[in-house]
Image (spheres, grey):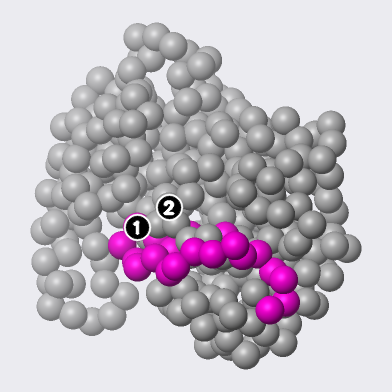
Amino acid sequence: MRKVFFAGGGTAGHVEPALAVAREWKSRNPQDQILFFGTASGLENRLVPEAGFQLRLITKVRISRSLSPSLILTPFVLIRSVHQCFRALSGAELLVGFGGYVSGPAYIAAALRRIPIVIHEANARPGIANRLGALFTNYLATSYPVSSRRLSRALIAGLPLKENIVKAHQACENNWSAARKSAKSALGFSGDLPLLFVFGGSQGSLAINSIIEQSKSSLKSQEIQVLHSVGAKNPLSESDSHYKSSHYISDMATAYIGADLIISRSGAVSCAEINTLGRYALFIPLPGGNGEQKLNAHSLVEQGRAEVISQSDFTARWLEQNIQRLLELSKKSPIEGSGQDIIAASKIASLMEFALSGGK
C-alpha cells in the first residue's frame, strides 16, 4: 500500500480539481492510502471528509500582497507549517499539489524528503505556491498554456472535473437540444422562455446579487426567467413565477445545462464546468488577485461562447440594455458542451504514475 498526499486547500478552485484526481487515482489504485493537507479555515474541511479521504491540518501561511506587520511573522509561520508537512509526509511516496495556501509548505517539505512532486495549475496565470513548487519538479500540468517560467513546459491537461459534471456531459451527448429543454423543466421553469442562471462562486457575490436584485422587474417584464444562487450567507430575495433564489444550488450540472445564459465569476472551476455543460456566459472577473480570472475566460470568449465585463461596468442599466443581445448570442453559440476537460483527471493520474516510476 502506497501513501499519496494531495495539497490543494482554501477555495473550491483548489479543492475540487484535487478531489477529482484523487478519485481517479483511487479507482486505479484502490489499495493506496490517500490523504489531504488542509487548513482549519478552508473548504477542504467539509469537502475532503465528505469525499471519504483523510485530512491533515497544517498552519495556514498567508503572504500579504502589501507591506504589513504580518509579513514579519510570515517566515516563522512558514517554518512551522513546513515542519508539520515534513512530519506528515513520513512514508509518503508522492505529493500532488494544486496551489493555494496549503501547497507551498507541502512542496518545500516534500523536496526536503526527496519525495516526487506532481503539480497542477488550474488558472491561466499561475499563483505563487505553484511557481514555487515548480522549482522542485519537472512533473507539471496546467489547464491553460502558460507563456513563461517552468510551467510553460507543462503538460496541458485541462481542468479535472467533478464526477457529476462528467456524467452529465456524457448523458447529454446523444441529444443536447433535448437535454437542455429537459433540464429547464427539471429546474421548474417554462421551456418556452429564456432562463438566466446567476451565481457568484461558492460564497456568492454581493456585487452581482445587488445588480440582479435591481434588475428583477426589468427581467420579468422581458419574460426572462432567473435562477439565482445568492451564496450561503447572503439574504434570499422573494421568489415568484419568473425568479427563484437559493442559498446554494446542489445540482449545478442541471442548472448549467438548462440555462440559456449564465452570469458568474470566472474562476477556473466555473469556466471549466461552464465550458463542459453551458451554452453562453457573461463573466464578471473578481477584482483584485493577480488577474487570473480575466485570463481564465479567454478561451470561452475565443470560442464565441462567452463575454467578459468588469465589475465596475456591470450595472442594472447595462444589463437591461444588453440582456437581449446576450440571449441572441447564446442562440448562435454551439448547442453542445465541450469535452476538452473530460479526461483531465485521467491525464494527471497518468502523470502521477510517470512520476512514481521515476520517468524523465
* Quarter of the image where one finds residue 347: top right
- Residue 338 can be seen in this image: no
**Residue 124 pos. (x, y %):** 58, 60
Q: Which residues are magenta?
A: 221-242
* Quarter of the image where one finds residue 183: top right
- Residue 253 can be seen in this image: yes
Q: Please tell me whether mark 1 sits on a helix, a strand or a loop.
A: loop
Residue 332 lies left or right of residue 144; in this view the side is right
Residue 110 vertical position relative to residue 13 in the rendered view, above or below? above
Query: Which residue is disc 2 drawn over?
Result: 248
* Residue drawn at the location 64% of the way across and 42% of the way down: 186
Residue 212 vertical position relative to residue 278 in the rendered view, above or below? below
Q: Quadrant of the N terminus?
A: top left
> Pointers 2 and 1 in contact (CB under 8 A)?
yes
Most extreme residue toward the right is 332
Q: CA distance from mark 2 to mark 1?
A: 6 Å
Query: Disc number at residue 78?
Result: none
Query: Which residue is disc 1 drawn over?
Result: 232
Q: Please tell me whether mark 2 sits on a helix, a strand or a loop.
A: loop
